[in-house]
Image: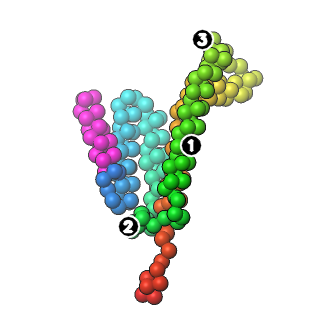
């Protein structure tokens, strides 16, 4: 039974992911994303992580995809855009320069954090159980130490991904200036 659930959920995830990439209409791509997210939720249930499955459905498939659909409908990006139109002439060269700079900064951050790991003292094995109630920010400090030392690369890549998503949203929202012939008809 577990193999059957895994195969069905895997097919849901693959079909939805391919649909997100292949679909040209943004609403259809968002619906394919919902299929992918539901497949991941089924995988969570199969691993007996019901809370993660509920969060996956409620937060991602519910709130985030509805937000995507709202932005798609609001911006009206269902029409084809002419990607050859650039707001200023050196846009692509400037974008490559900024992208190279961001990649360089992430690389430097990852290398410097790896060198600084020797300075961070490992926590004792019983540190998790020794958190006192009076120390209300003990878990936050441990989380910050873990996030900015052991997982700094993932943290930086996530921040770059979010910046790229914001820039992509701005580019999708921009409109080409209308020619005089389009405004008269």
Single out the mark in the foreground, 3 or 1: 1
Q: Secondary structure at mark 3?
A: loop
Which is nearer the N-term, disc 1 or disc 2?
A: 2
Q: Tags 1 and 2 in contact by the CB under 8 Å rule?
A: no
Q: Within 10 angstroms of label 2, few (less than 14), some, or many (20 or more) residues?
A: few
Residue closest to the far right? 134
Residue of label 1: 101
Horizontal side of residue 55 vs 43, given as left or right: right
Rendered-image quadrant of the N terminus:
top left
The correct choice, above or below, for 149 with respect to 75 in the image is: above
Disc 1 versus disc 2: nearer the observer? 1
Q: Nearer the viewer, residue 86 or 67?
A: 86
Q: Which residue is mark 2?
A: 80
Question: In the rendered structure, are the residues bearing label 2 and label 3 in contact, judged by CB atoms less than 8 Å apart?
Answer: no
Choose the circle earlier in sequence order: 3 or 1: 1
Q: Residue at x 49, y 56 (%)?
A: 92
């Amino acid at each position: 039974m577990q193999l059957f659930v895994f195969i069905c959920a895997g097919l849901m995830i693959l079909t939805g992911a391919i649909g997100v990439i292949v679909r040209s209409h943004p609403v259809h791509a968002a619906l394919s994303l919902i299929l992918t997210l539901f497949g991941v939720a089924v995988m969570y249930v199969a691993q007996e992580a019901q809370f993660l499955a509920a969060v996956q459905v409620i937060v991602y498939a519910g709130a985030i995809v509805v937000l995507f659909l709202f932005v798609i409908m609001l911006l009206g990006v269902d029409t084809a855009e002419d990607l050859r139109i650039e707001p200023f002439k050196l846009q692509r060269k400037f974008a490559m320069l900024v992208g190279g700079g961001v990649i360089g900064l992430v690389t430097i951050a990852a290398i410097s954090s790896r060198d600084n790991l020797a300075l961070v003292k490992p926590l004792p094995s019983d540190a998790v159980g020794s958190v006192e109630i009076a120390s209300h920010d003990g878990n936050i400090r441990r989380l910050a130490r873990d996030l900015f030392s052991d997982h700094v690369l993932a943290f930086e890549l996530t921040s770059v991904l979010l910046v790229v998503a914001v820039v992509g949203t701005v580019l999708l929202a921009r409109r080409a200036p209308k020619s005089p012939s389009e405004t008269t008809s």
